[in-house]
Amino acid sequence: MTLTLYSSFLNVPYYQFTLMEKIYKRSSLLLIAGLLTISVTSFAQHDGAKHTGHQQTLKSKKLNALNFIKITAGLGMSTYYGDICEGWDCYEFRHSLALGAYYRYNPRFCFKLDAFWTRLANSDKIYKAERNLGFRTDVYELSASAMYDIFPFEHHFEQRRTIEPYVHAGIGLAYFNPMGQLDGKWYNLHQYQTEGKSYSRLTPVIPFGVGLRTRLRHDLNISLEFTYRKTFTDYLDDVSGKNYKNPNTFVGGSTSTAAQLSDKTDFGYYPDKVRGNPNRKDGYFTFNFRIEYMIEAFSDQSSKGNLNRVVTGKKTIKRR
């Protein structure tokens, strides 16, 4: 599903999605180009080591499963869960992008730093048409997580298992800014205080989930990761309060932009009309495919037994 399809589904003019679509496409191209560069460089280094001259002395190195660093990049999909969408039947998915780094601490645990972007959006027009609320927001997140491997790493990275399941959990900070549409134009909902309250657009998040990685070659993994991000805000969608604010109390009265963004129903205001659920915070699910590239997994083995043997002037390179 593309951004164009999303635009049509939400009845949003295509040009309003153009900027994020360009960013997403360029990020994808940069990721692919980077992976190709890594692949070419790695294979070139491998061939260079294989054809080293017989009399040249090389420092022996081998891949080690502990204390190495990986860089990771991922593309995926996200969907919001909150006052406007409370079940599987109304989820709407948007693109996401993740960049990060891993550090393996021991055979079971590694630690991850992640920078994450996604766009969340949803509307009432199908499932709660009488309320007629809707929103979109870009979410920018930084997080730190611990990852626990179900099966421990073997001593040598290149001898690791083909399939590696894991669980992960952490803490982070996210920035969001919900936008609402009125007469074909998008407005900053936080600015208009549609419920008569101001709220922070920064929220702590707790990402947790499961993943499954598999190796493509000795220094490259691909993984599928599912994460739920619990937030500490009820305003990802700008909807929280149980009842609507009296439209006459907005600056400019019931015909003001704020009043119209707050209440889009067709049957007028009354005090008990339900707007949201203040007893539950918002959150979002993410599904990401990730590429993981090992950049530091070499340890000097010169003092622990050389893998390279020099026999009568002829060098034999043993590889695991």
Image (cartoon, rainbow, N blue to C red):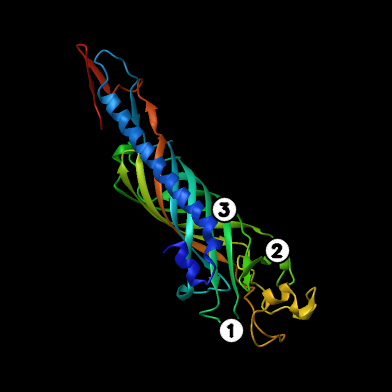
User: Which quarter of the figure has residue 153?
Assistant: top left
CA gap, disc 2 and disc 1:
26 Å
| Mark 3 vs mark 1: in front | 1
Q: Give the amino acid type for the residue marked by disc 1 in the picture.
A: Glu
For the point 51% across and 49% down, the residue is 145
User: Mark 2 belongs to which amino acid?
Assistant: Tyr
- Across and down, in percent, residue 127 comes to 51, 80
Picture quadrant of residue 191: bottom right
Compared across the picture, whether 282 is left or right of 75 comes to right
Q: Which is closer to the viewer, label 2 or label 1?
A: 1
User: Quick check: can you spot residue 109?
Assistant: no
Q: Is residue 250 above or below residue 217?
A: below
Q: How many marks?
A: 3
Label 3 with label 2: CB-CB less than 8 Å: no
In the picture shown, does residue 106 fall above or below 200?
above
**What residue sits 38% from the left and 37% below the top?**
37
Q: Which residue is mark 3?
A: 141
Q: Position of residue 199 (x, y in %)?
A: 70, 63
Of helix, strand and loop, which one carries label 2? loop
Q: Are marks 3 and 1 in contact (CB under 8 Å)?
A: no
